[in-house]
Amino acid sequence: MKRMLIIEDDDAIRTGLCRSLSSDALDTAGVGNLMSARQRLDAERYDLLLLDCNLPDGNGIDFCRELMKRIPIPVIFLTVRDSEIDEVAAFRAGACDYVKKPFSLMVLRERIAALLERAEKRSNLYVDRRYRFDFASLDFSVDGTRVYLGSTECKLLAVLVKNSGKVLSRAALTDALWEGGEELNENALSVAVSRLRGRLGEKSVSTIYGLGYMWVGDRE
């Protein structure tokens, strides 16, 4: 299920949006100011923000610009501001869409669905100078040459790439690969890492001794 945070200071609009936009595929939460939004975003994961420009403790466009430096999350502005200057400023701050009040609820639902679909497709694709991984179609290539991965290597690669630049402990990787703590041969993870390196290159995955493994990719 996807999660959306609605940042809107009008209680009636916020409550109505939460009720109307919630579905089996989308969970919504609402806050009335930027301070509460920051607290929510620090504590929880969201897939999309619906953001007003005029908020009691700050400007939504400035907040969007600040947020993009920390969390690259899709943002749709929903605002009474209808000037081209504000719209351009919102897009330059990192917004994906700009919806002016009054708005059609049906159209807003479609805009949200389209944005989440695009974000999902992007999240399934990893590309750098040497590697191209499409996790949706299970199409993996190194320097333009296709490689074939087993199911365990696919899962291991997906977890490592999703956390690129972060060191993942052996325990965390074992839990992710074998669904939370089945007792396994001590060498199972080492074998999976070795097989992945054999297909992608020895330096693609770095061993951080005493801590775990980290996806390196083309930073050799």
Image: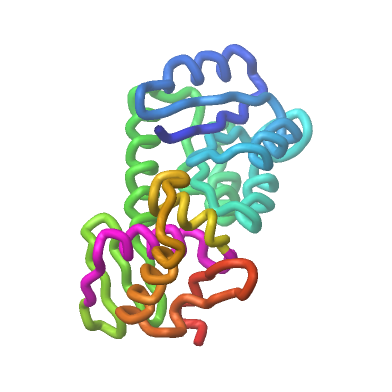
Name which residue lies at 39% across and 23% down. 104
Name which residue lies at 61% across and 37% down. 44
Viewer-proximal residue, 208 or 143? 208
Find residue 49 and report its horizontal and vertical position in percent.
54, 38
Q: Is residue 128 magenta?
A: no
In the rendered image of this protein, does residue 30 appear above or below residue 173? above
Viewer-proximal residue, 51 or 47? 47
Viewer-proximal residue, 39 or 113? 39
Find residue 24 and report its horizontal and vertical position in percent.
35, 23
- Looking at the image, how many numbered discs can be counted on the residues? 0
Viewer-proximal residue, 89 or 220? 220
Q: Quadrant of the N terminus?
A: top left
In the rendered image of this protein, does residue 70 appear above or below residue 193? above
The magenta region covers 147-167
Find residue 41 and report its horizontal and vertical position in percent.
64, 40
Name which residue lies at 23% across and 61% down. 138
In the rendered image of this protein, does residue 158 appear above or below residue 205? above
